[in-house]
Image (cartoon, grey):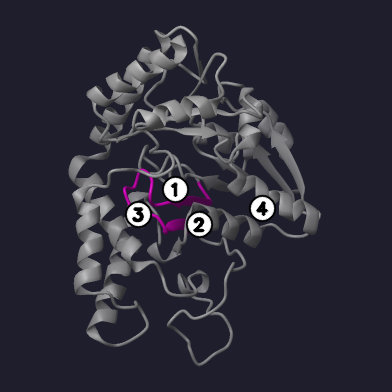
């Protein structure tokens, strides 16, 4: 199989990830914080190490403010539903994923929250002047993605912060974490939400959110934390306040393996290989008559390995079916981001998304080009 859907989840996983998950399941397997026996203590130590290393990876100031969740969607729900109250004003952009738009839609209908959507160009550039104009004294928070999941466009965080002033910034970094360097202190990110199974090389079932000092959302879940069990009230200490229920410890072990792989290879080398694969695919697609590529075709160092394309007179589903028959995995449709596709001009049919990864080879890309040529020539 030629796997080109790394924006959904990375595959294959590095040996470090597989070994870490297998080791936990085979030799530990305890429930962290739910016992004083060796297996539970080993699991708690693993969770602590993962929290420390992931917090350090984004230059978090206090590791206890790094909260593990089920996925990036839960992270965004915790931040948005926990921080936005009755009648608040929220600013977002025209490139957002439904993990942002659906919570905001819910709040607009149930808490009378006002939502302002700042336009983006079809190539994915955010209108920073409009962003500045959308922010007012009533604005509670700005919620936006760092990098688009359909175009790969990355927004300039320094200019975003300049435009929004001291307003609370909730950043969806599901596509950028592990693909680009992120520093929550340097970039003045108040809340950052992401999944751990994409460019962090973890496995599915784990996300995280980091909260700046003083940011205290209402918990999304209440229940057992393994601490303060004599009280019915939810603990106030972090991370327990937000981590009710048994954690996905095998996935946390996999995250440790993924971080080990990134540290061994170096983020620069990983980014370079992905950029080279993306550029090779872009150049190949541009030479095929009848194929349209959306967004910026001249990618810089600060863009993501994501390409959106369509074939003239072919539905995206037809292209995806033909790729699948050739044992090539791409993703077609609206990619859970209908508003972003409206911005690009590909709604309602959507497009074909190609997202290479670290392990994508030149031979695999050459095979993709052969298949695309055949599809476009029909």
Residue at x-position 29% and y-position 88%: 36
Q: Locate residue 9: give its quadrant.
A: top left
Residue bearing mark 2: 212
Quadrant placement of the N terminus:
top left
Relative vertical location of residue 332 with respect to residue 47 in this rendering, above or below: above
Is 200 magenta? The answer is yes
CA distance separating discs 3 and 4 = 25 Å
Earlier in the chain: of badge 3 and badge 1, it is: 1
CA distance separating discs 2 and 3 = 26 Å
Earlier in the chain: of badge 1 and badge 2, it is: 1
Earlier in the chain: of badge 4 and badge 1, it is: 4
Residue closer to the observer: 364 or 92: 364
Q: Are marks 4 and 2 in contact (CB under 8 Å)?
A: no
Residue bearing mark 3: 203
Residue at x-position 19% and y-position 58%: 19
Residue closer to the observer: 31 or 236: 31
Foreground mark, 3 or 4, reads 3
Query: Could you classify mark 4 by the number of other residues whose Cα lies within 10 Å: few (under 14), some (14-19), or many (20 or more)?
Result: some
Relative vertical location of residue 299 with respect to residue 57 in this rendering, above or below: above
SS for dot 4:
helix
CA distance separating discs 4 and 1 = 24 Å
Query: Could you classify mark 1 by the number of other residues whose Cα lies within 10 Å: few (under 14), some (14-19), or many (20 or more)?
Result: many
Whether residue 164 sits left or right of residue 86 in the image: it is left
Residue 359 spot, x, y in % from top left: 25, 35
Magenta part of the protein: which range? 189-210
Relative vertical location of residue 223 with respect to residue 204 in this rendering, above or below: below
Q: Are marks 1 and 2 in contact (CB under 8 Å)?
A: yes
Is 121 magenta? The answer is no
Residue bearing mark 4: 103
Residue bearing mark 1: 184
Foreground mark, 4 or 1, reads 4
Residue closer to the observer: 284 or 319: 319
């Amino acid at each position: 199989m030629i796997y080109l859907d790394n924006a959904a989840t990375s595959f294959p996983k590095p040996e470090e990830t597989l070994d870490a998950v297998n080791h936990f399941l085979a030799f530990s397997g305890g429930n962290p914080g739910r016992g004083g026996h060796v297996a539970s203590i080993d699991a708690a130590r693993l969770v602590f190490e993962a929290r420390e290393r992931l917090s350090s990876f984004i230059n978090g100031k206090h590791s206890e403010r790094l909260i593990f969740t089920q996925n990036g969607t839960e992270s965004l729900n915790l931040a948005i539903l926990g921080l936005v109250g009755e009648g608040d004003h929220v600013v977002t952009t025209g490139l957002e994923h439904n993990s942002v738009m659906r919570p905001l839609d819910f709040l607009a209908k149930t808490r009378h929250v006002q939502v302002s959507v700042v336009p983006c160009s079809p190539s994915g550039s955010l209108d920073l002047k409009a962003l500045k104009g959308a922010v007012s004294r009533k604005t509670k928070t700005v919620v936006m993605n760092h990098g688009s999941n359909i175009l790969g466009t990355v927004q300039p965080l320094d200019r975003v912060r300049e435009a929004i002033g001291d307003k609370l910034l909730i950043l969806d970094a599901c596509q950028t974490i592990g693909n680009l360097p992120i520093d929550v202190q340097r970039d003045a990110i108040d809340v950052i939400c992401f999944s751990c199974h994409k460019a962090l090389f973890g496995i599915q079932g784990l996300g995280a959110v980091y909260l700046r000092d003083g940011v205290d959302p209402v918990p999304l879940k209440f229940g057992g934390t393994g601490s303060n069990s004599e009280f019915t009230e939810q603990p106030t200490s972090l991370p327990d306040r937000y981590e009710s229920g048994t954690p996905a410890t095998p996935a946390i072990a996999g995250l440790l393996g993924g971080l080990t792989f990134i540290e061994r290879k170096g983020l620069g080398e990983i980014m370079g290989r992905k950029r080279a694969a993306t550029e090779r695919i872009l150049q190949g697609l541009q030479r095929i008559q009848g194929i349209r590529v959306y967004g910026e075709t001249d990618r810089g160092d600060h863009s993501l390995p994501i390409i959106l394309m369509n074939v003239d007179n072919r539905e995206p589903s037809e292209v995806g079916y033909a790729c699948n028959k050739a044992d090539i995995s791409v993703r077609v449709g609206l990619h859970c981001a209908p508003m972003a596709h409206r911005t690009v001009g590909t709604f309602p049919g959507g497009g074909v998304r190609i997202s290479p990864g670290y392990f994508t080879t030149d031979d695999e890309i050459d095979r993709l080009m052969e298949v695309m040529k055949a599809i476009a020539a029909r």
